[in-house]
Amino acid sequence: MHYLKRVQQGIDFVEAHLDTEIALSNVAKAAGLSQWHFQRVFRALTNETLKTYIRSRRFAKALDQLRTTKLPILDIALAAGYETQESFTRAFKSCFSLTPGQYRALGSRSLFVKKVELDADYLRHIHRNVSLVPQVYEQRAMQLVAVRTLFYGIDSEKNNLAKKLPPLWASFLPRLAEVPHAVPGVCYGVVSPMRASSDQLQYFAAIEVSQQAALPPGMLALEVPGARYAKFCHQGPAQNIDNTVNYIYSSWMLSSGASHTGGVDLEVYDSRYSATSDASLMHYAIPIN
């Protein structure tokens, strides 16, 4: 229940600060997690981004205020994060097909968006058909040669993963023969946040080398420290890997009692991977305490 409690602490922080500007990093801090890991776990548990949740909760509070108070609509709009009553009205009507004034006159409760309450039954409902068991192993330190890109993952509203990662691999794989002392047979995707207070990620398409040498143009050296990892199989198209990652960051981490160390996640591609086959097999591994 470790992560469940932490995410609930973050949700409670949001609830207590709906009338103020909420920095995502402060929500994560209240939960005792890095911003990336909080957003990743939150997305896996709720199937929505943290920023979307905050916006919907502010809308929910505005709905309740319209129904139960006589506050001016402008005051409600400002508290919900809108600069003008007009912008609030446009957003409100787009969402609910009613103006705030019409909703107030209606007095309906049916539009209210409730606060998320997380519990084990809720998670079992989401993942009732999942029963993945990882291989837990000691990953030795690796020297890699890689190409790098920056991107936003599915836990961010700026998600551009599909635009960033395939072209990176498409440019890297034809150049593997240029890498001196490459260890053949396995390639790695290395994932980590840019900063603790950012939802921007860095991704390395990489291959291990037995020793470092002069780097091919546009490539860089990367070291992955030794650590204990939990490695999960993912069968099927690589573009569906988020289904596996969501399971890891919600159901498995909740039930196993393991904690993410904050190190890099690894995608492992060997001869069983195929970009065109539904029988393709790859692995996703996270560093754990």
Image (cartoon, rainbow, N blue to C red):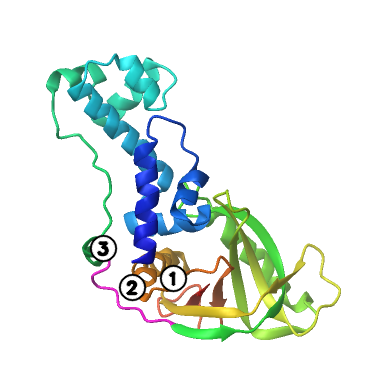
The spot of residue 78 in percent (x, y) is: 39, 21
Answer whether residue 90 is magenta in the image. Answer: no
| Separation of marks 2 and 1 at Cα, in angstroms | 27 Å
SS at badge 1: loop
SS at badge 3: helix
* Cβ atoms under marks 1 and 3 closer than 8 Å: no
In the depicted structure, whether residue 90 falls above or below residue 211: above
| Separation of marks 3 and 2 at Cα, in angstroms | 14 Å
The residue depicted at 44 percent of the width and 53 percent of the height is 31
The residue depicted at 41 percent of the width and 27 percent of the height is 81
The circle drawn on residue 126 is 3
The residue depicted at 25 percent of the width and 73 percent of the height is 129
Q: Is residue 122 left or right of residue 136?
A: left
SS at badge 2: helix
Q: Nearer the viewer, mark 1 or mark 3?
A: 3
Rendered-image quadrant of the N terminus: bottom left
In the depicted structure, whether residue 77 falls above or below residue 252: above
Viewer-closest of 235 and 19? 19
Q: Could you tell me how many numbered marks the image carries?
A: 3
The spot of residue 234 in percent (x, y) is: 43, 76
Q: Which residue is mark 2?
A: 255
Amino acid carrying mark 3 in the image = Ile
* Highlighted magenta segment, given as a residue range: 126-134
